[in-house]
Each structure stands twice: as structure tokens, then as C-alpha cells.
Image (spheres, grey):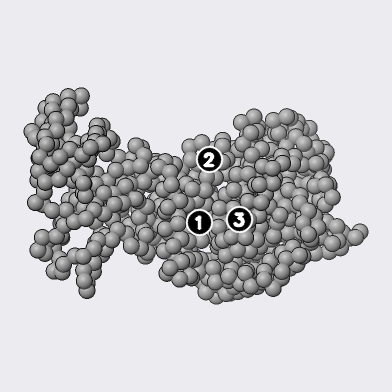
Amino acid sequence: MLRTATILFFVCLMIETKAQPILESLAKSEMMRYDKLTRANTKRSNQGNVDIRFATLSFEPDMSNADILSASVHYIFKTDASITNIEFDLRKELTVDSVIYHGLPLVFVHDNTHLLKINFPTAINAGTRDSLSIYYHGATNTTSRAYYRAVTVSGASISTLSEPYSSHFWWPCRENLHDKIDSLNVNLTVDTPYVAVSNGKLASTSISGGKRIFRFEHRYPIATYLVAVSFAKYNFYIQQAFLPSVNQSLDIRNYVFLHTDLADAKNKTLETVRIMRLYDSLFGTYPFYKEHYGHAQYAWGGGMEHQTMSFMANLSYDLIAHELGHQWFGDKVTCGTWKDLWLNESFATYSNLLCYDFLRTETEWIDILKKFKTEVMVLPYGSVYKNDTSDVGIFFDYRTTYQKGAMVLHQLRWVLGDDIFFKAIRKYLNDANLAYKFVRKGDLRAYFELESGMQLGDYFNDWINLEGYPEYDISWTQKGKELAFEIVQTQSHPSVNLFNVPLPLLVKGANRDTMLRVDILTNYQTYNIMLDFKVKEVIFDPEEWVLAKYKIRFPFSDDVTITTFPNPFNGFLYISLDDIDISGWEIVDATGKLVLSQSYETPLQKGVIEKIDCNFLADGVYLIKINGNDRTMVRKIVKN
């Protein structure tokens, strides 16, 4: 009980802060514990041969104990090949009462692998448009928060949150990232004090037998996990955002618990208008502008980007910005595998950051970039792309999937420039072969390459597929008008040999400064430039574009003599510094891998010659980094 109480206190405390995307990540991973345990033992419906064209979901919840009563789903589908059966995913805790096909009941099997297999009386030919209805009831499995009941000050509420593997906890569906439902109706019946919310436009409301009936229509393709319903005692209000891209106003529909401060809620959601207009200008028209956008408060942590209606724990600035960004990234274009979840979450997180760039102060923008970079680099490993999707905690990892992915996009914006970066994103979002469909990282990369004319295979491989970040040791000196740099890159993780992102270096004089863009071609390199002013200071990446750690050394002097001999060498290498003491040295190979090192508790005195046994090294080019008392020097050495 103590641990549970502590976690609840921590979550409640964080809800009051602005770090809401962190809450989203925590909420999703916490909520999906059960899926993580059961997914390996759960079959998934056959994904081929059937295209779901239309679905009508009808629900009547029991607000007192989270039972689903008189629930049904009507599907219209088209066959891509001849079929004799069709499969849906549905938890075994839910009881299927009947499956009706052309007015007659069908034979079905609903087994302990949570698979509902329905047999047709005769084969259905390829290209046939057909339909069936599934009627079911029962108490949902409460080990998942997919269908979650809570009691707030305003009374009971029931909400769904299905990402990534939990749609089948509350309705019979095809749990996949292959086939979006082309069009959707949702009919919700609930006791009169309550209000029901779902995807799409509210087409009608009516009252029958003391109950309210809400009918929603959604006429855009939708992924299974983005279908959602919520029931609570809500206050409701509408705000409007004008969209210049289509020259029309859009309703922003807001549902907040009765006990919520309504004036405060309206003030907070007004930010949605400014953010919507920003995204409209950067990414293109809001994807569901023919319907609406909205927020529905729910009693779980963080938020969830349900299509046209985000479910929100609160109405903080960051949570509003993150979930609205998802309407483009995650809803309009949806990752085609959970391995590519970053296509949803990194973009939504960077959308949130862009609000600081364009709508907040310069100080806030720089501060949040510094915060993100620090938190990403607190550990030396972790990839944005996730090979393991069985552990939900891994692929919803906030540091890598959200923060690192966002900073990798930010860094790419520096590499390409704003014009190319945003133009490529708009074309990616509006490609007829991708819009309202599933996408992979190759689709995104193709547009960045098309617009820039650059080959970005190394960038995507190093920063998305592989792990870590670069660390730079930079020394500089100036003789007359010549400014010289020595730049040494090491990598925090051995999966990457070289990160070749250009470095922004601000060179400052007494009354002048200039920004240098230094291409990184090797792990050790020199860079020289002619300047007509005396340099006082060199600042690494003052605008926080590059994800890297760094040290900038005091100006080094070419008068310091480093002797490494012989060079090329065979078995033994000798080093000597004539002017400074030696505290240690490291030898790395051409890939940046450390192969030999030595540190001294008592520094070697200047003038001492040190003998290094290198007989075991393979022939090739190496770098030796020699650490002096106030500087580091690097030299290229060759063994043959």
C-alpha cells in the first residue's frame, strides 16, 4: 500500500506541472503492464484478405461497475481474396451472444487466446462487399486500463485508451497497423446525468426511456487503437480557430468534469487556437477540418490522441500542444509498426517544442532545448527505433522515443534548414499514398532526401537505428589571421563509428563575431579559417541545435612539442612532451573504438619518454590522445 500511495502522490504532483508529455509516457507504460504480460500468449486475427470499410459501434455502459451492456459492432468489409471465415480480436472475458450474417446466426469460436473466429456457410468470393454484426456483453478485464472506470468528485466516469495492444479488451476488432477503418459511426447510450463522447461529429442526441443517446459520425480513415469512447458528467463549451489554409473556422469542442473550474479551463484551452494556427502554417491544414477537434477530460494520467478528440488528464499547455500535434503525426499518418512509434511520438514531442520556438520567449525556447538534451544524454545508450515491441515499457521509453527522437528531428532541421525541413514534412503528410494511411521511416526519409538532394541513410541509421551521441574535445588557437581547430569525436556507444553532423561554433571577438559551420568528416580533424579580428572566445552550438557533449580547451600553442616516434611504427611507440606533464593517454582506432589507454596517478614529468607496447595492434591508422596538465593533444599514428 505504501508503494501504491507513493506512486499516486507522485503522479498527482506531476499533473500540476508543465511536464505533461512525461506523464503521457508514464501513463501509457503503466496502463499497458497487462498487455506486456499477455501479448506473447495472445493470437492476433488474420490480417490479410479483408479490408474493413465501415464500422458501427453501439455501447451502453453500466456506470456503476464498468460492465458493457447490449454492445454490438456492425462491420462492412470487402474481400481481397476468397474467404471462408473471418477473425477478430476480443478478450475472452467478454461474452459473444451472437454473430448475425444476412439475418441469420453464424457459427463462431471464441477461444482462450482471445481470438474470435467466425465461419461463413459458403465461401465469399474475392472482391465481394459484405457485412456482419457481432453482439456481446460482459465485464471487461480490469488489469488493463483500456476500459477504465473511476470515481471523481463529479461522479463516475468510464473512458477507453487502447494504445498499443488493448482495443480488443473492450470491443471486437482487428488489432493491427495494416488496415484502417474507412468510416465510423458510434452510438452511445448512457444514463441521463451523463454525457458521452467519441470520435467525429456529434450527429444527433436524443432521450429514450430516461437515457441519453449520442450518435457520432467520423468520415476519415481511423486506426483501431484511435477509436475511443468516454462517459462522464461533463460541462461542455465550444471555441473556434480560424484556419487560413482553408479559409474557414474550426470548432474546438471541450468536455471537462463538472467539478473543474470552468473559467480556468476556457482560459487554458484558448491556447489551442494559437497552437492550431501554428501547426496549420507549419504542417498544413488540420487533417480532420471537415469535422472538429476537441478535448475530453478523463481520470487517467497524461493524454491520448484519439482522432478528433484527445482525452486529457488536464489542460496544461504542453499536453494540449503534444496531443494536438498527434492529429497530424499518429492520426493522419500512423506508424505502420510499433518499431516506428517515434514517427508518432517524436513528431508530437517536437511539435510541442516548436510552440516554444514560435509562440514563447527565446529564453523559454533555449531552456527547454537544454533540458531535453541533458535528459537524453543522461545515459550513453538507447535507440529511437525499437526492435523489441513485446515490452511496452521499452518502446514507450520517454527518453529515447519521445525526447531523443524530437532532438534528432530538431538537429535535422539544422542540417537541412527551415525551408527544406518544413517543406519535406508537408509533402510527406500530403502524399496521397501516405495521408490517412500507415507509414514507415523510409517514407519520411524519402521526402527529406527529395527536398534536400542529400543522401540521409547515414543520418537515419546513426541517429534513429543505432545508439548514443557524440562527445567532442575541441582545441583552438589563433596565429595572426589564421584560426585553427583540433576536433576529436568519440562516441558514447560503440554502435556508431562517426556522427557526421556539422558543428555550429560561434567565434567571438571584442566587437565582432561569426558563426562557423564545421563539417565533421573523421574522428580527428583539423579546421583552419582566416579571420580579420582577434578571437576572444569560442562557443559551441549557442542555439542548441546539436545533440552532443563537448569540451572546449584553452587555446593550445603550436610551440608545445609532441613527439611520437617512430611514425609509422611497428611494435613499440614512444611518446614525449617537451613542455608539459603527461597525466594519461588513449589510443583509438579508425572507428573511434578505444584500443589502449593509460593514466598516471603521478603525472609523468615533461621530457620523460614513455614506451608503449603496441605489438598486438593490427596494421592501420590510429589516433593517440595525450592528456596534459591543461590541455589535450591528438596525433595520427600509423602501424605497419
Q: Secondary structure at mark 3?
A: helix
41 with respect to 409 (left or right): right
The quarter holding residue 462 reads top left
Residue displayed at 66% across by 55% down: 12
Q: Secondary structure at mark 2?
A: helix
Q: Which residue bears the numbered disc 2?
A: 394
- Percent from the top left, x then y, of residue 509? 21, 68
Q: Which residue bears the numbered disc 3?
A: 14
Q: Is residue 503 visible?
A: yes
CB atoms at circles 3 and 1 under 8 Å apart?
no
Residue displayed at 83% across by 56% down: 190
- CA gap between label 3 and label 1 equals 18 Å
- CA gap between label 2 and label 1 equals 17 Å
Direction front: furthest residue: 602
326 with respect to 197 (left or right): left
- From the viewer's side, name the closer residue of 343 and 78: 343
Which comes sooner in the sequence, label 2 or label 1?
1
Q: Which residue bears the numbered disc 1?
A: 349
- From the viewer's side, name the closer residue of 14 and 376: 14
Quarter of the picture holding the C terminus: top left
Q: Which mark, by number, is residue 246? A: none
